[in-house]
Image: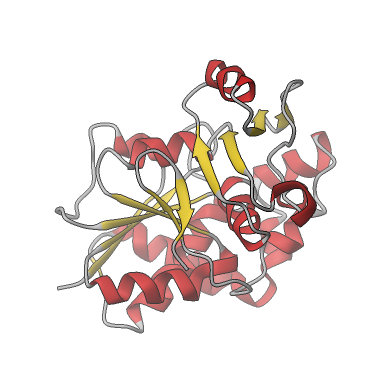
């Protein structure tokens, strides 16, 4: 049986508390920040992206000459070239570049996920392309919400639900309740997704504290790219 599971918080990766038995593929999701920005970077010609474990590494990679994208709690680090919003990863900034990347949630989740599975990066932007690629691999799939500081969040769970819906149409089966939670949220919200996402604490954080709410409509676009970001344990590359 080909199964799909949803992990609502990266906290469940540490023991891990994942029902699916290996080997399986994982999809890390960070809708309003990292995975949408990574998809955008590859859309605009980035060569590779190195996810960093901690802030100390950002200085090391900056000194090595990498283009540095880094933020803490949504605010760009003073020594960084870019923050963590998709609109910063423009063709002029990222084409042909190797990017070192540190974020509050997404990059940490990517590194944690690698301890249990192959890691792909998903967003609303690349659902169909990524799902079609993984369907061909004929393995179970675990969708991982990056959340916010280990707490579940609305937007990543909804995106996971969109993946679940697509996978169910292609022969996959849910094996636990969190996949149904995600699916139900997606089916409840997809007719007016932007309005629904305004409930999310991360939306309010972007709107009220960071003046970054303009990135939300872009981040909620469905299937606008064929990029397939894959983390090989050292760097993220595009397999498309």
Q: Is residue 102 left or right of residue 19?
A: right
Q: Residue at the location (36% across, 36% down)?
A: 112
- Work out whether 95 lies above or below 204: below
Total residue callouts: 0
Q: How is the image coloured?
A: secondary structure
- Work out whether 163 lies above or below 203: below
Asked which quadrant contains residue 82, the reply is top right
**Place of residue 195 in the rendered image (x, y in percent of width and height, measured from the top left):** 73, 64
Question: Which residue occupies the foreground of this view, 175 or 45?
Answer: 45
Asked which quadrant contains residue 9, the reply is top left
Q: Residue at the location (74% across, 29% down)?
A: 75
Q: Residue at the location (23% across, 41% down)?
A: 17
Q: Quadrant of the N terminus?
A: bottom left
Q: Is residue 52 left or right of residue 139?
A: right
- Work out whether 120 lies above or below 202: below
Asked which quadrant contains residue 102, the reply is top right
**Place of residue 118 in the rendered image (x, y in percent of width and height, measured from the top left):** 29, 51
**Place of residue 170 in the rendered image (x, y in percent of width and height, measured from the top left):** 32, 83
Q: Is residue 193 left or right of residue 162?
A: right
Q: Is residue 12 left or right of residue 100?
A: left
**Place of residue 113 in the rendered image (x, y in percent of width and height, measured from the top left):** 34, 42
């Amino acid at each position: 049986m080909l199964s799909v599971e949803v992990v609502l918080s990266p906290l469940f990766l540490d023991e891990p508390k994942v029902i699916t038995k290996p080997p399986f593929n994982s999809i890390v999701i960070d809708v309003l920040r990292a995975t949408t920005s990574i998809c955008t970077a590859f859309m605009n010609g980035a060569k590779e992206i190195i996810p960093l474990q901690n802030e100390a590494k950002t200085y090391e990679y900056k000194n090595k000459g990498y283009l540095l994208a880094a933020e803490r709690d949504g605010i760009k680090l003073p020594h960084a070239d870019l923050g963590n919003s998709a609109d910063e990863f423009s063709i002029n900034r990222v084409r042909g570049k190797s990017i070192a990347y540190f974020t509050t949630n997404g990059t940490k989740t990517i590194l944690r996920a690698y301890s249990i599975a192959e890691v792909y990066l998903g967003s609303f932007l690349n659902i169909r392309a990524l799902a079609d690629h993984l369907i061909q691999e004929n393995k179970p799939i675990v969708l991982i919400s990056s959340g916010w500081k280990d707490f579940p969040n609305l937007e990543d769970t909804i995106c996971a639900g969109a993946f679940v819906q697509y996978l169910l149409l292609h022969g996959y089966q849910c094996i636990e309740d969190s996949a149904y939670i995600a699916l139900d949220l997606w089916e409840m919200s997809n007719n007016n997704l932007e309005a629904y996402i305004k409930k999310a604490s991360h939306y309010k954080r972007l709107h009220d504290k960071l003046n970054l709410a303009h990135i939300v409509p872009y981040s909620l676009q469905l299937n606008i790219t064929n990029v397939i970001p894959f983390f090989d344990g050292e760097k993220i590359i595009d397999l498309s």
